Amino acid sequence: MPKPTVLFVCVHNAGRSQMAAGYLRHLGGDRVDVLSAGSAPAGSINPVAVQAMAEEGIDIAAEQPKILTTDAVKTSDVVITMGCGDTCPFYPGKRYEDWVLDDPAGQGIESVRPIRDEIRRRVEALLAELLPAA
């Protein structure tokens, strides 16, 4: 079975989508291809998101926000959107999920931890669906 590709999309690609991608890379290893992008990428990743993930032993500090391309959507099996609304391109035949999560932008670590933990829970559930135990 080919490796599934998952694309996480939010507006700035600086917080939620980066944390989700970090978790999926960490938990899925080489069994999943992981992409993340934003419809209007920020200049840099959210330092509080980096800190929150570092507490989990996952380093996303080197990640850079990337612009969402149609190719990224076309090559993905699952597209997870997080508050990008109508700016996310839609292609028939793709699996789409919209994860409603608070935006960590401008929030302190105490507010970002529960967002991070919810992202982890959702990523674990997604992984269980994509890669059922043999």
Image (cartoon, rainbow, N blue to C red):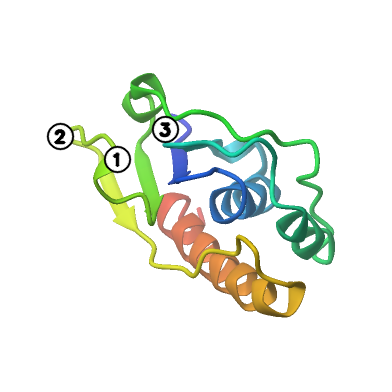
The residue carrying mark 3 is 1
Separation of marks 1 and 3 at Cα, in angstroms: 31 Å
Mark 1 and mark 2 in contact? Answer it, CB < 8 Å: no
Sooner in the amino-acid sequence: mark 1 or mark 3: 3
* Above-or-below relation of 71 to 50: above
Kindly report which numbered mark, 1 or 2, lies closer to the viewer in this rendering: 1
Residue at image position (58%, 72%) is: 115
Looking at this rendering, what residue extends furthest in the top direction? 71
Kindly report which numbered mark, 3 or 2, lies closer to the viewer in this rendering: 2
The residue carrying mark 2 is 92
Inspect the image, locate mark 2, and give the three-letter code of the amino acid beneath it.
Pro
Residue 2, percent across and down?
43, 29
Residue 11, percent across and down?
45, 45
Which quarter of the rendered picture does the N terminus lie within? top left
Residue 9 is left or right of residue 31, and the answer is left
Mark number displayed over residue 133? none
Inspect the image, locate mark 1, and give the three-letter code of the amino acid beneath it.
Thr
* Above-or-below relation of 120 to 83: below
Residue 16, percent across and down?
56, 56
Sooner in the amino-acid sequence: mark 3 or mark 2: 3
The crowd level at tag 3 (other Cα within 10 Å; few <14, some 14-19, many 20+) is few
The residue carrying mark 1 is 87
Looking at the rendered structure, the secondary structure element under dot 1 is helix
Mark 3 and mark 2 in contact? Answer it, CB < 8 Å: no
Looking at the rendered structure, the secondary structure element under dot 3 is loop
Inspect the image, locate mark 3, and give the three-letter code of the amino acid beneath it.
Met
Residue at image position (67%, 49%) is: 22
Separation of marks 1 and 2 at Cα, in angstroms: 16 Å
